[in-house]
Amino acid sequence: MLKVWFAIPFWQRVLGAFAAGMLIGGLAPEVGVALKPLGDLFIKAIKMLVAPLIFCAIVSAITDLNDGKKLGRLGVKTIGLFMFTAVIASAIGLTLATVIDISPETVLTPTEQNEKTIPSVSEVFLNFVPDNPFAALTEGNVLQIVVFAALVGIAIQRLSQKAEPLRKTIKSGAEVMYEITRMVLQLTPVGVFGLMSWVIGEYGFSTLLPLAKFVGVIYLACLIHIVVVYGGLVRTAGGMSVREFFKAVFDAQIVAFTTCSSFGSLPAAHRAVTERLKVSKDYASFVLPLGATINMDGCGGIYPAVASIFIAQLYGIPLEWMDYGLIMLTATLASVGTAGVPGTALVMLTVTLNVIGLPLEGIAFIAAIDRIIDMARTLTNVTGDMMVSRVVARSENLLQDDSTVKTES
């Protein structure tokens, strides 16, 4: 039985579980909700990997990239491309939300809205540095883990032979984490089945009807951004056909769509980037955790732009051109400041609404369907991480074996 199961291509197993989950959730909602523990098990297994995987992978990547100047150049190129796509993402969201009337046709009942604390700019920057790196690892504070791992990697690189035993230990630790990751990824179909059964069973297809146009514009903006922007960059700068790219990253996209977590999708994204996009393991271990931390085109770019205009239309508040500019600026900055975990996009939306003076109560109208929207947002974020991996790796000759990947002249 197991031989038959594993003989089926991985992406087909995941897609089949996705479809089966939607079917169960739609036909038997109570059963779908009861299957949620399967999804919770998968997410817990993924979260178990995140902290040690990111720490070992980043330290190993930095110590293997011996050229300090090259490391700096990689960082500038990677972050620069993240910012470039963030600007385009917010522009797409603003354009579609302006052209299409997304105000609801029926009166909606607000859900309970918990007050969220928005940190100041200084608090955001201070939060980069951990008070206790071991506490950061224990609590899964990914941004602090990334900073500490980068410092450890740079220190090991500067000490050279003196720190060689530690370098080898951490590199071995990274290999162990990669192997555990491969084991956990076999649970993906089970997790996807449980999560989709629960989402459809809990919310139902009817939940989307009053906000159909709003949800539709979010999904349309994400689709355009993924296909046109990411696909165009892969074809022109990544040296790879669009079809082959999306075929290569499909598994990771499904994981991102169902888990709604950029960090939770890291193992699947790492596998897709290194095994199918042929990006070197060192650079993949550097760019993917960084992207999961600061590259949020869906959560911080598209979503705040569309939601801000939706709330303005909902309350009949006219927006000036300056307001659109502020939305775009705030949404772009938010795209590099949103944590890659489920739910925090609402916090960044609060920031955007505050900047342009829109009522925060409007968030309550869309909070009930946030999980449905988060699926598209996270899919966009993770696809962007993988696109940047391929594009920058090709520009820096960091592809493992480009001849095995279909390219276009």
Image: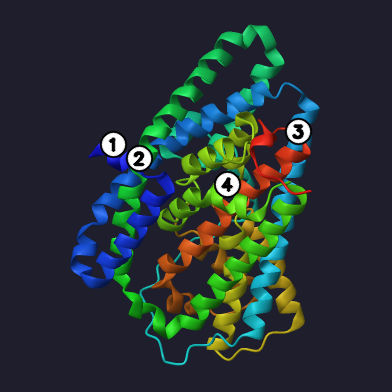
Q: Which mark is in front, 3 or 2?
A: 2
Q: Residues within 10 Å of mark 4 (few under 14, many from 20)?
A: many
Q: Amino acid at mark 4?
A: Thr
Of marks 1 and 3, which one's residue comes earlier in the chain? 1
- Residue 146 lies, in percent from the top left, at 58, 36
In the rendered image, residue 396, in percent from the top left (x then y), is placed at 77, 35
SS for tag 3?
Answer: loop
Q: Badge 1 is on which residue?
A: 3
Kindly report which numbered mark, 2 or 4, lies closer to the viewer in this rendering.
Answer: 2
Kindly report the distance in space between the C-alpha atoms of the residues bearing marks 1 and 2.
Answer: 6 Å
Identify the element where label 1 is drawn: helix
Q: CA distance from mark 4 to mark 1?
A: 38 Å
- Give the left or right position of residue 298, taking residue 39 as reference: right
Q: Measure the C-alpha gap from mark 1 to mark 3.
A: 39 Å
Q: Amino acid at mark 3?
A: Asn
User: Residue 397 shows which numbered tag?
Assistant: 3
